RNA sequence: GGCGGCAUAGCCAAGUGGCUAAGGCGGCGGUCUGCAAAACCGCUAUUCGCCGGUUCGACUCCGGCUGCCGCCUCCA
């Protein structure tokens, strides 16, 4: 049984889907106006882990992630580049999906775009007006917070008009609202902006309405889980609840799940501080995408994660050891005799499952894998593991990796020339011709191949 | 000003009202090796920001303090 921290109840709740065996998940996706940064990617990676865990538990998962392709930033960006909004957002949506693939994030069930669901949004807005929850002013439509008494139930934030005015953070002059706290459902077009026809004249959707419309369109009026970074709790998710529940009269989301942000070198990531990383930049610096995945999942999702370059090196090292372990286990021959490792693997599996079921404790689950490695290693070093034990360990690693996605790796192969050099070196060693053996080793190293002599013969691996 | 979170070894990071405070990286020592490398083994927090309180017992609960961070601006 999965226990999941629910922002809606502020505690860990047992998870039970509405429909037996099927889990519906809506994740707030990116606004496609730039390359995703690693902070964005952490959130999306968490969604991936959650979905993978549910699938491994036997659920059918319908996970939808929206792509916001119309807002101030996308409009500004497309105008700056002198291309159409559609052309501009298509490009960044592609970059986004590529980055997900690079990080081994499994594709969502659907990636709906806001601009492809204008009609559904207009329907919601129209009905909200009919039901008395929204009003039109000068071509824009606003949600009337005073008509929805539950406003603030998710975040605990109910803005006082007095306060917001004092802080001057709500721009009252930009649009005419009855109350500064009311939020926009439909924005009247400004000159030169992309717009769609509506009963209130040309305009474009407000930010929050797309999630309501698309969540209901693909997942129904009530969804099991709704994900998004903590910054979205207020106002985005609060507004989604208000407009959705006012529209349907039903509970919108059963479990609200909010991954924390990451910080970089102990500080908030920002372009001015120069600690703003994208996946591409890190790859250009030579880091392995799997190491980045590992680092991004190395802290519990509800804790801020401190992303550092040193941490990336640490992840790279940890993975190298894990991969080497998996390779050495796989090399155990079929006729090997010894331990079958049934108890060790069972213990690891039990811990792995328990940790993930406890609010997706990925660091704990990874520890289970490393603990098994420590149990198995001494036997492995002495060649005391049976073929059955080998298969059991490999099966566990493969099973664990359906959630973690960090163990599978390319072993690669070497060409005939290198094979020949290795054979020649073995002969030299047999002849105790150490200088020739070392010469060959240096030669191979120059080609990026590290030779390791083991009791079972020489092994090779690629140098970092 | 309002709401919320976090402070655990050199670094990253789990965790619990009392049984040895996970795991990773790094470091040190050792085994193996022709020498290496890798691997393996051992050691590496008598202590969990500080001060009080509750309790038979707190790192774990409560209060205060200090520090850091987030939201209250269409930021994941």
Image (cartoon, coloured by chain):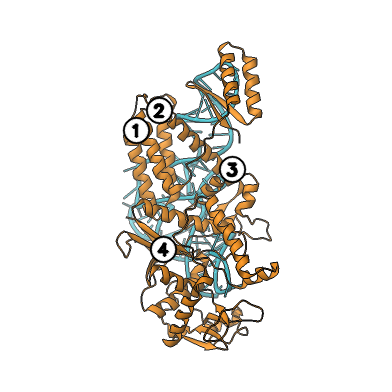
Chain colours: A orange, B cyan
Where is mark 2, residue-wise? A379
Q: Earlier in the sequence, mark 1 or mark 3?
A: 3
Q: CA distance from mark 3 to mark 2?
A: 28 Å
Q: Is residue A185 above or below residue A89?
A: below
Above or below: residue A358 compared with residue A194 = above
Instruction: Tell which circle, 4 or 1, labels the residue nearer the N-terminal end.
Output: 4
Residue A185 location (% of width, % of height): 51, 80
Mark closer to the chain start, 4 or 2: 4
Q: What residue is shown at x 60% (from left), y 61% (from top)?
A: A92
Q: Quadrant of the C terminus of chain A?
A: top right
Q: Position of residue A349 (x, y in %)?
A: 35, 43
State how far apart marks 1 and 2 are (Cα): 10 Å
Residue that mark 4 sits on: A25
Q: CA distance from mark 4 to mark 2?
A: 43 Å
The quarter holding residue A450 reads top right
The picture places residue A18, in percent across and down from the top left corner, at 32, 65
Kindly identify the residue that appears in the image at 36 percent across and 76 percent down: A250
Residue contact at pointers 1 and 2, CB within 8 angstroms: yes
Cα separation between marks 3 and 4: 34 Å
Instruction: Give the SS element for disc 3.
Output: helix
Q: Same chain for the residues at labels 1 and 2, yes or no? A: yes
SS of the residue at dot 2? helix
Q: Nearer the viewer, residue A118 or A9?
A: A118
Mark 4 is surrounded, within 10 Å at the Cα level, by few (under 14), some (14 to 19) or many (20 or more) other residues, namely many
Are both tags, 1 and 3, on one chain? yes
**Residue at figure coordinates x 63%, y 44% from the top left:** A286
Q: Which residue is mark 3?
A: A313
Under circle 1, the secondary element is loop
User: Where, quadrant-wise, is the N terminus of chain A in this rendering?
Assistant: bottom left
Disc sitting over residue A341 in the figure: 1
Chain letter belonging to callout 1 = A
Q: Nearer the viewer, residue A413 or A345?
A: A413
């Amino acid at each position: 049984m999965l226990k999941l921290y629910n922002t809606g109840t502020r505690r860990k709740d047992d998870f039970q889907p509405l429909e037996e065996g099927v889990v519906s998940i809506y994740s707030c996706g990116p606004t496609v106006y730039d390359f995703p940064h690693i902070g964005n990617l952490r959130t999306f990676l968490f969604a991936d882990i959650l979905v993978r865990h549910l699938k491994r538990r036997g659920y059918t998962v319908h996970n939808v992630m929206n792509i916001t392709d119309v807002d101030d930033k996308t409009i500004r960006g497309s105008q700056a580049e002198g291309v159409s909004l559609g052309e501009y957002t298509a490009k960044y949506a592609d970059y986004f999906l590529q980055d997900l693939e690079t990080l081994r994030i499994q594709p969502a069930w659907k990636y709906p775009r806001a601009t492809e669901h204008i009609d559904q949004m207009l329907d919601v807005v129209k009905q909200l007006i009919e039901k008395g929850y929204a009003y039109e002013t000068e071509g824009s439509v606003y949600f009337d917070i005073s008509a929805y008494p539950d406003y603030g139930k998710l975040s605990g934030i109910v803005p006082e008009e007095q306060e917001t005015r004092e802080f001057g953070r709500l721009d009252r002059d930009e649009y005419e609202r009855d109350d500064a706290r009311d939020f926009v459902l439909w924005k009247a077009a400004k000159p030169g902006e992309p717009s769609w026809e509506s009963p209130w004249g040309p305009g474009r959707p407000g930010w929050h309405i797309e999630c309501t419309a698309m969540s209901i369109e693909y997942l129904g009026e009530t969804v099991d889980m709704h994900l998004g970074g903590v910054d979205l709790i207020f106002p985005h998710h609060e507004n989604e609840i208000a407009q959705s529940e006012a529209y349907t009269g039903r509970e919108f989301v059963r479990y609200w799940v909010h991954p924390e942000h990451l910080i970089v070198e102990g500080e908030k990531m920002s372009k001015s501080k120069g600690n703003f990383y994208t996946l591409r930049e890190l790859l250009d610096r030579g880091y392995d995408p799997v190491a980045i995945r590992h680092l991004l999942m190395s802290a519990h999702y509800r804790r801020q994660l401190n992303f550092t370059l040193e941490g990336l090196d640490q992840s790279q090292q940890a993975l190298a050891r894990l991969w080497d372990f998996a390779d050495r286990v796989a090399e155990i021959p079929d006729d090997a005799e010894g331990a079958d490792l049934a108890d060790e693997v069972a213990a690891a599996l039990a811990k792995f499952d328990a940790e993930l079921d406890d609010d997706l404790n990925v660091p704990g689950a990874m520890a289970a894998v490393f603990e098994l490695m420590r149990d198995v290693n001494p036997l492995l070093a002495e060649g005391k593991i049976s073929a059955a034990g080998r298969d059991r360990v490999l099966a566990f690693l493969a099973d664990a990796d359906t959630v973690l996605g960090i163990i599978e790796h390319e072993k690669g192969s070497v060409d005939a020339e290198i094979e020949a050099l290795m054979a020649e070196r073995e002969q030299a060693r047999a002849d105790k011709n150490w200088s020739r053996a070392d010469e060959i080793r240096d030669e191979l190293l120059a080609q990026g191949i590290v030779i390791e002599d083991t009791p079972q013969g020489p092994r090779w691996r690629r140098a970092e």
